[in-house]
Image (tube, helix red, strand yellow):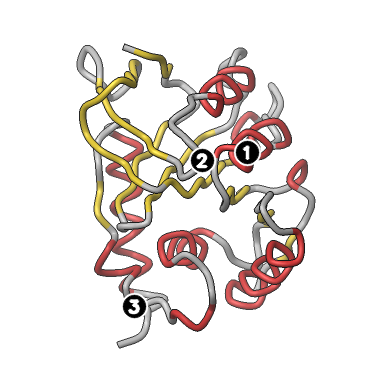
Amino acid sequence: MKFDPVHDAQSIFRSLLAAHSFPGTLRDIKNESSRIDPELGLDKGLAALALTLVDGEVAFSWIATDSEPASRKDSETVAKLCSSEAVDATAADFVFAASGIGSVVEAFLKAKEGDLVDPDRGATVIALADALMAGGPLVARGPGIKDAARFTVEFGDGRSEDWMDARAGRNVEFPLGVDLILVDRSGRLMAFPRSVKLGRA
């Protein structure tokens, strides 16, 4: 069975709404993302989110610091899949970080923050992690969270939280800032709007 651009995308969108409403809680899109064609050569979770969020009305950027040719190929694949345009990360509505902490940090450094007239023009970073888990050393506080939400994010290149520092640096003047969606290789996701503060327990 192939990914259904209507029903599967709607189901993922509902999961994203729930994840944004309750930051730091896990949502599962494994069933939907498992229907992504493996021959595309993309992580299934990232591809499913691209098909849900990206279309001809928005622009995206794809960052994969491990291989520039592979990054360009993946970017062209997503552009074709979503009938969208790949642009520099500084102009993108959605910035995909596909290769570990380095790509996530780069995505946050480049992503647009919006402006005071139109803060919702700030970008969303969509980052691929190796694993997401409830509980652990990281903590989120803010709207939608009772007291605090503890969680774990693991990347293949270590458990460093450099990405959190990069995110904090772009979210100092609310309502300006950059939103974050994390998806792991098992099809679990979390979302952290710019209004949520992340730290270490």
Amino acid type indicated by mark 2: Asp
Residue 106 spot, x, y in % from top left: 68, 37
Packing grade of label 2 (10 A; few <14, some 14-19, many >=20) is few
Residue 14 spot, x, y in % from top left: 30, 54
| Residue identifier under label 1 | 102
Amino acid type indicated by mark 3: Arg
Q: Residue at x 66, y 56 (%)?
A: 62
Q: Nearer the viewer, mark 2 or mark 1?
A: 2
Q: Residue at x 54, y 44 (%)?
A: 100
**Label 2 residue SS:** loop
Residue 188 spot, x, y in % from top left: 30, 51
Residue 146 spot, x, y in % from top left: 20, 17
| Residue identifier under label 3 | 35
**Label 3 residue SS:** loop
Q: Quadrant of residue 151?
A: top left
Mark with earlier residue (2, 1): 1
Amino acid type indicated by mark 1: Gly
Q: Residue at x 51, y 46 (%)?
A: 127
Q: Nearer the viewer, mark 1 or mark 3?
A: 1
